[in-house]
Image (tube, rainbow, N blue to C red):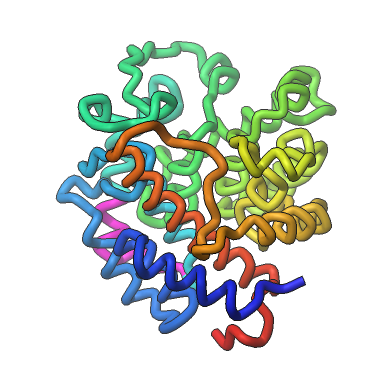
Amino acid sequence: MNLSKENFDKAKSYILNNASPIDIAWFKYNFEHHDADIFLKALEKYQFDTGGFGGLFYEFDYQGPCLKSTEMAIWYILNLKEKPSANLPIIQNMMNYILKQYLPGIGNWGDVAVPEVNNGVHCHWVRYRGNAITHIDDENERIKQYDPNEKVCFAAFVTYYSEIVPKDLYLDIIKYPIEHLIRYWDMNSPNYKKHIFEEGTPYDFEYFQWFIHCLKEKDVAEKLTQILRQKPTSFMELDYARSKNDYVHLPCDSVAFTDNVVYPVVKKLVIESIEYRMKLQSDDGRWALGWSLGSGEEFQKLQVLYEANRTVAMLVKLKQLGKLGKHIQN
């Protein structure tokens, strides 16, 4: 089952008429010119003097720099077909920003939002929480309390470009996600936390894939890969119909990359779920979220941008999975 040319063209039209400039640039990179330099020039427009990015996330209208928008910039860079040079200013400045935000006292990063997010339109689940960061003296306790949700993607970027990170700092940053997985996610570990799999929350599982994908220590990466492969469906919604009107993560959502560490063991489910989602394409070409960001005109503007972003991502994944057919030459 492949997406028809008619439906591809509908999606393309929706993207070009509704998407933000960065999503249009991402579409053109994947389906037209394939030139990473052109795309990076588009991405640079969202980078501030601090090295952080703004305006890349659609669950709030704050356009200034923050870790959350910088996370989205990392996603784009990791999904480029060729790794950009570590010598590029966009990479150098981005790394400086990320390292300055790192908190050695907890072995992690803090809030991914900034106070200004709360002053504008924002979804209730994405806001600056203002939690005080308490230094944790004991390293083992820092490992135990490690929060991978969103934040481990910054460790992924650090290991992806470890050649421009001071060695001691690099080793400190990667130690916490590695040890947290080994101690608390491995079913063979005496410290195994059974509730991680029983509760089935997808976020940590998905972000850890970013980290392992980038990890240069291949023997460690292989060990972590086997841990993530133990019960991958615990983090996936297998009742595909729920995605029509609810915020759920199907297998095609939970697997972050088609060449990632988990994909080989859930390939059948990924294909099944993305074929199901193909059928949910709207008449106007978009793939709707299935849930509302909020009520009012400003939330509707964000909803349109988010759904255009989702539509680009859907086309890219369909291409990766060979679901576009010969009618898409590029």
Instruction: Tell which residue pokes out farthest to the front in this image.
Output: 283
Q: Is residue 182 visible?
A: yes
In the displayed structure, 218 sits above or below 174; it is below
Q: Quadrant of residue 230?
A: top right
In the displayed structure, 284 sits above or below 2; it is above
Rendering coords of residue 72 (x, y %) = 40, 49
State the quadrant of the C terminus. bottom right
Who's the residue at 57% across and 34% down the image? 177
Q: Quadrant of residue 190?
A: top right
> Seen in the image, is 77 located left or right of residue 132?
right
Rendering coords of residue 55 (x, y %) = 28, 48
State the quadrant of the N terminus. bottom right
Instruction: Tell which residue pokes out farthest to the left in this image.
Output: 49
Q: Does the magenta segment cover residue 166? A: no
Who's the residue at 26% across and 25% down the image? 118
Stretch in magenta: 83-94
Front residue of 151 and 167: 151
